[in-house]
Image (cartoon, helix red, strand yellow):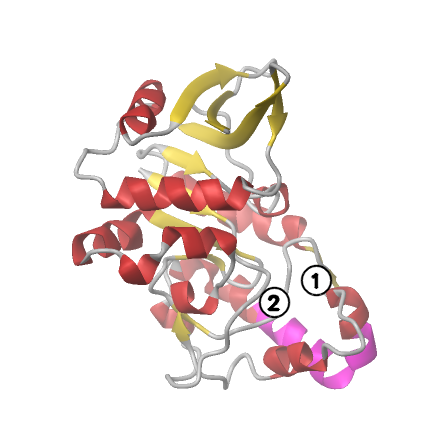
Amino acid sequence: MYFLIPPSEGKTPATTGGALNLNKLPFAELNAKRNEIIDALVALATHKPAIASKALGLGPTQGDQLDLDRSIRTAHCASAIEIYTGVLFDHLGYHTLTARAKEIAQQSILISSALFGFVFPQSPIPAYRLSGSTVLPGIGPLGGFWKPELAQVVDTLSQELIVDMRSGTYSKLAPLPHRENTIEVKVMTLVKGIRKSVTHFNKATKGDLLRASVSSTRKFPQHIGGLDSYFRQLGFTAEIEVTQAGRPELIILTQ
């Protein structure tokens, strides 16, 4: 089973470690696209900082974010799980997992990246500034840029159950095909008996789901039909619903 998760917009730069080596990242077939977007981002931040700031949505006090992009190829790298910070990653609590749980996480969690496509938790990357919603001069909307290549990567995972925890922004980079082994996670709550999407605790709940899954001694389910009972056994209120378009969703209900 694979869990697809978003990155964090905030990133913690590494203070030690070697420079970026794309050959150390998974899915070598993405390296041509990685080189293309890195070159475009570095050039933009270096030679056209005003345009870069606008494209990246930076404020007047965020010039250090451009420094990150200028030095993508030379900056220290650390594992992606150390670079990405935020609520989901805090609740996953990777560094407090057992060795066994870390190994499962490394094999089953794929982090969606606007700059690198997909990376595993231990993939060595530098900090950078680039959102999945950015329209990058010279590249255009990142959905159109990444979609063909990332669709091929998803195809290579097609023998496994794929649980999509990404936000809409990152789902657009690699939309999942409508197959019997792909499912999206929706975190919801009951308000006066009506289900409402959760906003504030959405990322926290997904981090909790990940932590419980990789820490469990239970085997991952092989089919979508077993997902709801699997997560119920891990202590969550879970059920599977089918949308009007015929796509299954894993609903996690919170208080």
Kindly indicate whether the residue at mark 2 contacts the one at mark 1 (C-beta within 8 angstroms): yes
Q: Residue at (57%, 72%) from the top-left corner?
A: 128
What is the three-letter code of the residue carrying label 1?
Ile
Q: Residue at (35%, 70%) from the top-left corner?
A: 24
- Pick the residue in front: 237 or 244: 237
**Quarter of the rendering occupied by the N terminus:** top left
- Number of the label disc, if any, that sits on residue 249: none
Which SS type dominates the magenta stretch? helix
Looking at the image, residue 60 lies above or below residue 198: below
Image coordinates of residue 231 in percent, x first then y, are 33, 28
Q: Residue at (52%, 45%) from the top-left corner?
A: 203
Residue extent of the magenta highlight: 36-51
Crowd class of label 2 (few under 14; some 14 to 19; many from 20; radius 10 Å) = many
Q: Can residue 137 be seen in the rendering of this structure?
A: no
Instruction: Classify residue 185 as left or right of residue 143.
Output: left
Crowd class of label 1 (few under 14; some 14 to 19; many from 20; radius 10 Å) = some
Tell me the residue that label 1 is attached to: 139
Q: Can residue 189 be seen in the rendering of this structure?
A: yes
Image coordinates of residue 25 in percent, x first then y, are 38, 65
Tell me the residue that label 2 is attached to: 37
Looking at the image, residue 176 lies above or below residue 144: above
